[in-house]
Image (cartoon, helix red, strand yellow):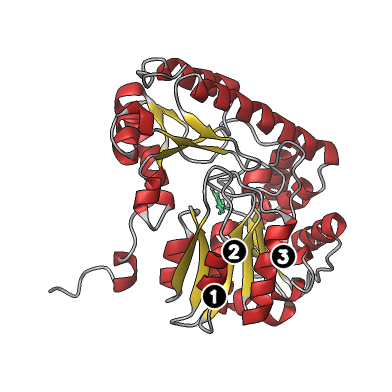
Amino acid sequence: MSRLNGSRKPAQFKESVIREMTRLAQQHGAVNLSQGFPDFPAPEAVKAAARDAITAEVNQYTVTWGAPQLRQAVARDFTRRYGVPVDPEVQVTVCCGATEAMVATMLGTLDPGDEVVVFEPFYENYGPDAILSDAVIRYVTLHEPDWTFDPEALAAAFNHRTRAIIINSPHNPTGKVFTRDELAAIAELCHRWDVLAITDEIYEHIIYDGCRHVPMATIDGMADRTVTINSLSKTYSVTGWRVGWAIAPPRLAGAIRKVHDFLTVGAAAPLQAAGVTALSLPETYYVELATGYQRRRDMLLELLESRGFACFKPEGAYYVMTDIADFGLGDDTEFARYLVSEIGVAAVPGSSFYRDQALGRTKVRFTFCKRDETLQAAARKLDALRAPAGST
Ligand code: PLP
């Protein structure tokens, strides 16, 4: 066996199914409702700030932990919204997207053999992040239709090897928004087993029907054992900028910062400068963001349901999980491949969000972070799909 192969760690995970679906969409000229990136413009003021920063020669490395003004803006915003004090000098680390913030946090806080609790379905990066960190995941299932967890199953996932739990709220792929009571139940287990909560709150502002986002750091006693991860990507429609951050308790921040330093040194300097402008947009921006997405959500729900998809209505984030069993067109992967190649719409097979793939075999995820024209184009393509018997 040649030694000129990949190492053992990447051999344990597969290429991202979501990014593969985007490639297939391009290959087949399909409408891409698979990967969560907006196809409408980012806010003009934020783009202008990036251009101005480049012109003003903000083109060299920033401080490794992030440009001071961006760290201050992140800390100020979190404290103003949620009342949790954050020291930007110590606690905030700016990274290349929430993606790097998550892997830097896991590499910086987990030791080989530590266990991490993850809810399934999950955002697909957490599995590879755990493998890269030599950690072992314990999965706890979120049950449809409202994606609740069994408190006993959650309690059973904790033991003396548990080092962390990952929570993503609002949740990709289901749109679940964890309630204060659910977070309090998780917090109680974190206290009991001395466990860290790592929370991915990247869809913080994309929330519907009067639901409220509750950060784990606001739950009693949790600020000292929570790393909060967020980014510019979704809130400001700049997924390609790769600017995110981790807010960590002081005793953990140093470890995360060291890993981040040696992984990437820092995120793009002019885009960090533009992040300061983004974080100072008026409150109306966030209201319009959420109402715009709620309208698109309702549009996608209507167009999918009228064509025979059973949909789980999301409370937040910008995805709709559907059940496709009644179409009789095979399992999730067969269905998604048929959809992209024959119908011309790309979506993500549900099994890619589950460790127990059987749980995702009848599910397919669509995103609605798209212009009305894109959603209407998808609707026209989906007209060619034979609706399941008995559906409207
Ligand atoms: N976390 C979740 C839950 C996501 O859905 C995504 C992107 O889809 C990311 C993180 C990636 O964030 P970023 O673009 O900031 O790396």
Q: Which residue is mark 2?
A: 151
Above or below residue 281? Residue 276 is below
Which residue is drawn at the image coordinates 70% and 82% (left, top)?
A: 251
Which residue is drawn at the image coordinates 86% and 62% (left, top)?
A: 83
How far apart are the alpha carbons under marks 1 and 3? Answer: 15 Å
Location of residue 206 in the rendering, given as x and y in whole percent from the top left corner: 68, 42
Say which of 103 and 360 sits in front.
360
Which disc is residue 158 wearing?
Answer: 1
N-terminal of the pair, mark 1 or mark 3, is 1
Location of residue 234 in the rendering, given as x and y in whole percent from the top left corner: 63, 45
Whether residue 186 is visible, yes or no, is yes
Location of residue 266 in the rendering, given as x and y in whole percent from the top left corner: 60, 65
Is the N terminus in the top left, top right, bottom left or bottom right quadrant? bottom left
Which residue is drawn at the image coordinates 36% and 26% (left, top)?
A: 29
Q: How many marks?
A: 3
As shown in the figure, which amino acid type bears the numbered disc 2?
Pro
Note whether ligand 1 is within 8 Å of mark 2.
Answer: no
Which disc is residue 184 wearing?
Answer: 3
Whether residue 59 is visible, yes or no, is no
As shown in the figure, which amino acid type bears the numbered disc 1?
Phe
Say which of 239 and 348 sits in front.
348
